[in-house]
Every structure is written in structure tokens, then in C-alpha cells.
Amino acid sequence: MSLPIVEAAYKKEKPETEQIPFGRTFTDHMFVMDYEEGKGWHEPRIVPYEPLTLDPAAMIFHYGQTVFEGLKAYRTDDGRVLLFRPEKNFERLNLSGDRLSIPPVDEDEVLGYLKELVALEKDWVPEFEGTSLYIRPFIIATEPSLAVAPSKSYKLMIIMSPVGPYFSGGIKPVTINVEDQFTRAVKGGTGMAKTAGNYSSGYQAQAKAAKEGNADVLWLDGVEKRYIEEVGSMNIFFKIDGEIVTPALSGSILQGITRTSIIEVLKKWEIPVTERRISIEELYEAYEQGKLEEAFGTGTAAVISPVGELNWLGKKMVINDHEIGALSQELYDTITGIQRGRKEDSFGWTIEV
Amino acid sequence: MSLPIVEAAYKKEKPETEQIPFGRTFTDHMFVMDYEEGKGWHEPRIVPYEPLTLDPAAMIFHYGQTVFEGLKAYRTDDGRVLLFRPEKNFERLNLSGDRLSIPPVDEDEVLGYLKELVALEKDWVPEFEGTSLYIRPFIIATEPSLAVAPSKSYKLMIIMSPVGPYFSGGIKPVTINVEDQFTRAVKGGTGMAKTAGNYSSGYQAQAKAAKEGNADVLWLDGVEKRYIEEVGSMNIFFKIDGEIVTPALSGSILQGITRTSIIEVLKKWEIPVTERRISIEELYEAYEQGKLEEAFGTGTAAVISPVGELNWLGKKMVINDHEIGALSQELYDTITGIQRGRKEDSFGWTIEV
């Protein structure tokens, strides 16, 4: 079974440098599939990357019924193209979709379509150090109706964008503000789903943090405003007195695929790693006792983003002297090594396209 | 200053009955205005109601940066067309926009454009009892970029839809489920903003409630899961032992324009009305003591939606024997009377188009 493909008449120029701004350049083609009540998901196809035409009453514009994913295709030194645990993304797409009352897709089937799309656009996977092809699957509600109810039609699309290295010139630990006013998510809400509304709701906190010289925000739980949840749009890990601690999935934290992979790597290395509730007070106490050894965010974009400084209600925690920690570096090298085919993939995480 | 108008070549048929399904039929024209960083809001215009063309990477599809409003135009018995407190809607549009990092519009200016649009589409305001022209202003982020940051471009649109009566055959009290698992909003979140993500996040709770025979959901606060917030997408009022109580605006409750109007009417009538925290336990206690006399939701769609029954953790509160209360009826008659020009508008709430 092969997908119908409408080939783009005009092929765009591919970036000739590693300096590619994130998410602004898109490949020549995209994947589209439609859903209609009674008919299910149908008409999977690859078409030229082109504007979408939607009724102004399409539900996506009014009630935010939408979910998305983010993953990457990597080029190896010998020119092959690898995907990193892509099945996890479609598993999570359905998990998010369930929370937003969006009908599930056949995960294997859509992964197959993604592979066809990546194969067609293989030349778009950049080869420069640290670059990759960012892949954005997303589903939007398309029914033209202002009724506050689940849509009867949807569109699943996959668009792809070549991206530069997250850190140019090597990893740099960032300064983060612990947000005490705004809330990202709360138990019973949509925090564990990858859905649009979770992201723009953080812009004010981001702007406030940036004003005070912080690169990002550390979110606390919405109930007690004490327990650490995520950093910006990444999961967060701490090395405290030799032990690795990351907030347990609480229902309001996104289940990051890099997070899961880091935990699996640590377990394999027999380094103690615990998923549990951790309060900002506990973290500060550990810091004061000199036990807060490393801190890092994890996500598809950066893989590992070390935290060099945390600002919390006027208190400053400088972590590992603003330097990347030994474990953070080792985890970064290991995961990116597997992703780029430079290290042995003993976990079986990569899929060649 | 008059708006540029591109007139629709084809005029649609207007509904010839009061049985108009909500939000599915749209008028011949819509209002559009664009925003670009550095240029501000520009190019206000009236164009035929037509599909929107957007890049698949337009930020609205990915990060939910969007706000909306809902108001109505009413036809009076003598054929005039009235708007009900429309300035409040544009005030709230900017309030919501601030939370979502969307640049503000000039409220007076946009109200002027709305009036021009309604005047052009005057024949679309239906005359049947209980019908009206529903007006939906909304702003969407249009910049094609996957960066998690505020958009540099936006589109403000106003679309309009003739709607039938909320209750056909007179007001009917509804049965409501008190939601104990899902959360609508929490302090520090976006609950007080009219933004897309707040609505689809309630679909699962709605479905759960409907399964058990409930028409809607009563939301509790996200922190303690005790304090009453809203019902469905309406505000909620209770008459307890002669006093009217409505949850105080907590930062996670939408500031309803009908809510505000009801409070002002009650004050004028010298009926005691209090905005305060009220827990579901307190409500149940009042019920057990026979003091819960009336309950009703308020919103643009229904104006007053009486609650005949509340289901909370297996406990059932039957309110006023499933009948509409005298005060609920009087408030309904008063507000709808003002809206339709049948009662004296001593508050100066209506604007003739």
C-alpha cells in the first residue's frame, strides 16, 4: 500500500548553513489525512506544502480542540536518516487526543505514513553538526460550528522543518525563574496533554522571566504552588547528593519521551533515579547544604538543557558554578550519539528511514 | 470614516423559521482586521463570508494564542436592532488578550466597525420570538512559525449567525453534574480569559455528565475542589434563604456580562446579593436545611438557565421542585425585556444600530 502523492511543482531551496532559525522553513511536502464522523480517518495523502483553507467558524479557531507532537529525523555520518522512538509520539498523540475528545488514529499506520513522508523529503534532513529535521504532526478540529461540543471532523497534518543546533557553540547552562504567580496546569486539567492552549498560556510568565534576565520558567504545581513540575516546555531533572530526582507524572506534567529515555539510560547505568514529588523548598534546602549538584531540562528540541541558575522569590541558586555537569554532558552525548548513529543503540530506539 | 466593503456576489437564504440550529448558518459578510508587529492593527474591512487561508504553521494551530467574544443583536417588536452592552465585550476581549499576550485593539473603534457590520446585515437579525443574531468576534495568531513565543501577526474577525431560542417552548430547569475529577481552571491559569483552550478541555466532563443524564457540569475550583466556580460555560447564582449568592471572581472565573447585569438589577431591586466564595458542602447544607430556593446559570446564550437538580457524589439536590423560580423568571423577563426593547432600559444598556 503506497500513499497517493501530489508532487510539488516547485522545489524550495534547502538551507546551506547550520544557522537555520527554528520552525520557519518548511519542506516541499506535507502529509494530510481527514476525519469525518461515521467515516473515520480517511484519505491519507502527501501533497505540496501549501496554505490550509478553513471556514472562519472551524472549531479550532473557537474552542481549541487540537493536539500535536514534536519529533526529529537525524542524519548519520554515513548519510542514513534515523527517527528516535517515533512510535512513542503517536502513542502520546492518542493520549493527548483522548483528553481533548479527539478520535484516535491508528498509530502504526500513521507512523508508516510519516516514514513515507520522511523518505520523500530525505534531502531536507540537514547534515551539519547539531542540525535535524523537526517533524510536527498535529490534529485540528475543522467542523464549522460554534456549538461548544466535540467536532465531527478533523484534519491530521504532518509538516517538517529543518532546524539548526539548539545550542550554537556547545551547551550553555541557562538561568531560570521559578514562577510563583502564573500556573501552567493543574490536576484534572490538560497539563499531561500536548495541546495548544497549554503553550500560549505560558507567554506572560515567559515575558516576566525574560525581563529579569531569565531564559525560561520553572513551573510549580497549581494546587499548592510548591511542587516542581516542568521547566518551560521541558521536563526537569536534579542531581541531589548523587541521586537523580525528577517530578513524578502527576497528571499535570507532560510525559516527555526524552524524559523516559533519560530514566532508562540512568537505570541501565545503575545510577539511582527517582520519580517523586519534590518541592521548591526541598530543592532550596539541598542547595543550601551544597547537595544540589546538577539540574537539567529534557526535551526533543535541546535533548539536555543544563540549568546554571534558579531564581526563586529573590533567592538565587547557582548550580555547578554555571557549568555543565559531568552527568548532564554524558547523558547528552549518549542520547545524541544514539540519535545520530554514533553510539550503539542497545535500546533499539532508532528506526532507519 | 467609513469601512471599505466588498459586497458578497451571492446572498444566502435567511432562515424562515425560529428553529435555527446554533452557530451553523452565517451571514453574507464578515469583518476582518490584521495586525503586524511594527504596523499595529490595520486594514479594517468588511468582506464576503468566505474561507480563511492560513499557513499550516500559523501559530493558532500549534500554541492556541487566541481569544474570542460572544454577544447578540436583538430585533425589537417595532423592527429596530439593539445590541446589549457591546462595549463590555470589547473591554473583555482586551482583558483576555492581555492574558494571552495578544496586542489590544481600540475598543471604541472596533465597536464602531461592529455596528457597521450589523447595519449592513440588519436583515439577518431574525424576528421570531426568542431568536437573535449571535455575534462572534475572535482574534487568532497567524504568524507561520513553530517557535513557542507570541505571534508577530494576528487576525481579528467578526462573524455572525442567526440563532433560535435557547429554550424552545419556555425555560426548562436542567439537571447538572457537580464535576469532581476534571478541572476547568485554576488560579494563575487562563480561567478568567475567553480563550479557546478553556472550552475543549471541558468536553470529557460534559460527556461524563451527559452519560449520567445531566445537561451540564458545575465546576469546582482547581485547588481545593470545594469552591463553586461556573456551570458549563455560564456563571452560576443561588438563592439561599432569600439572599442571592454568586461565586466571587477568583481569577479562574469568567467575568460574565450577564452576570454583571444580573447583579446590577438585583442591587437596583434592593435584593441582597453577595459575591463570595461558596463551597459545595455549604450549598448541600443549605439544601438539607431547605434553604436552597433557586439556582440558575447566566450567560449570553440562555440569559438565565434555571438549575432544577444538582448531582454531587451520588447525592441529589432537587431545587424548587424542578420548576423555574419566581426570581429567576423575573430576572429573565427583565433582561430579555431590555434586550428586545420591551422594557424600559433604565440602565442605558442597549445601543440601537
Image: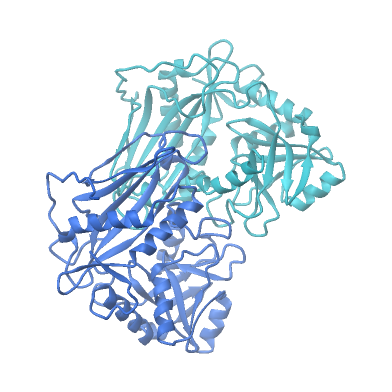
Chain colours: A cyan, B blue
Image coords of residue B222 (percent x, y):
57, 62
**Residue B179, placed above or below residue A269:** below
- In-front residue for pair B141/B35: B35
Q: Is residue A106 visible?
A: no
Q: Is residue B141 visible from the viewing direction of this image?
A: yes
Image location (x, y in percent) of residue B74: 24, 68
Task: In the displayed orientation, state which residue is furthest to the top.
Answer: A78
**Residue A345 at x, y = what percent?**
64, 22
Q: In the image, B113: left or right of B36?
A: left
Quadrant location of the C terminus of chain B in the rendered image: bottom left
Q: Could you say where residue B210 lies in the image, as x and y percent from the top left? A: 40, 65
Residue positioned most to the right: A289
Q: Residue at x 45, y 58 (%)?
A: B202
Q: Nearer the viewer, residue B7 or B327?
A: B7
In this rendering, is residue B211 above or below B270? above
Above or below A32: residue B343 = below
> Which residue is drawn at the image coordinates 58% and 77% (left, top)?
B281
